[in-house]
Amino acid sequence: MNYRIRCAGKALLVVVGIGVLGCAVTLLWNWVIPALFVGARTIDFAHALGLLVLSRILFGGFRGHGGWRGRRHWRKWDAMTPEERERFQAARGSRPTRPAED
């Protein structure tokens, strides 16, 4: 029962999030674009959702940015001692790929 409630809550959160993002894109587009470009038209909610999907396809894809697997990799790296990191890099034969933090 608890699993169903969590799934329903997550689904509701996704639907509300999509609605809020759609409204935000609609309001921002209708506020900025017609003022900047002569002849630009306002859009409705459905066009704003389409614009969100298009921008996700063009700029972000649908696979995410590494997901949990990437974070797991860096957790292992952070848990290593400096000696273990040096041995790992020597065995791999490349320089470190994570930028040093200030």
Image (cartoon, helix red, strand yellow):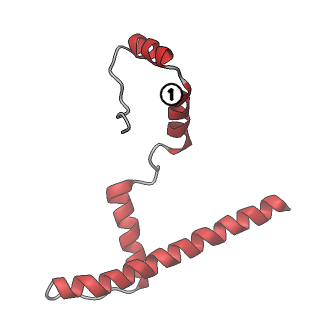
Q: Residue furthest right?
A: 1
Which residue sits at x=48%, y=14%? 83
Residue 52 position within the rendered picture, expressed as x and y whole percent measured from the top left: 39, 69
Of 16 and 97, nearer the camera is: 97
Using a 10 Å C-alpha cutoff, classify the residue at mark 1 as few (fewer than 14 neighbours), some (14 to 19) or many (20 or more).
some
Residue 59 position within the rendered picture, expressed as x and y whole percent measured from the top left: 33, 57
Say which amino acid is labelled 1.
Trp
Q: Look at the picture and state if 26 lies above or below 10.
A: below
Location of the C terminus by quadrant is top left
Which residue sits at x=56%, y=42%? 68
Which residue sits at x=52%, y=30%? 78
Q: Quadrant of residue 10?
A: bottom right
Q: Is residue 13 left or right of residue 55?
A: right
Residue 81 position within the rendered picture, expressed as x and y whole percent measured from the top left: 52, 20
Q: Look at the picture and state if 40 lies above or below 99.
A: below
Q: Quadrant of residue 8?
A: bottom right
Location of the N terminus by quadrant is bottom right
Of 102 and 2, nearer the camera is: 102
Q: Is residue 3 left or right of residue 67?
A: right
Residue position marked by numbered label 1 in the rendering: 77
Which residue sits at x=52%, y=39%? 71
Residue 67 position within the rendered picture, expressed as x and y whole percent measured from the top left: 52, 45
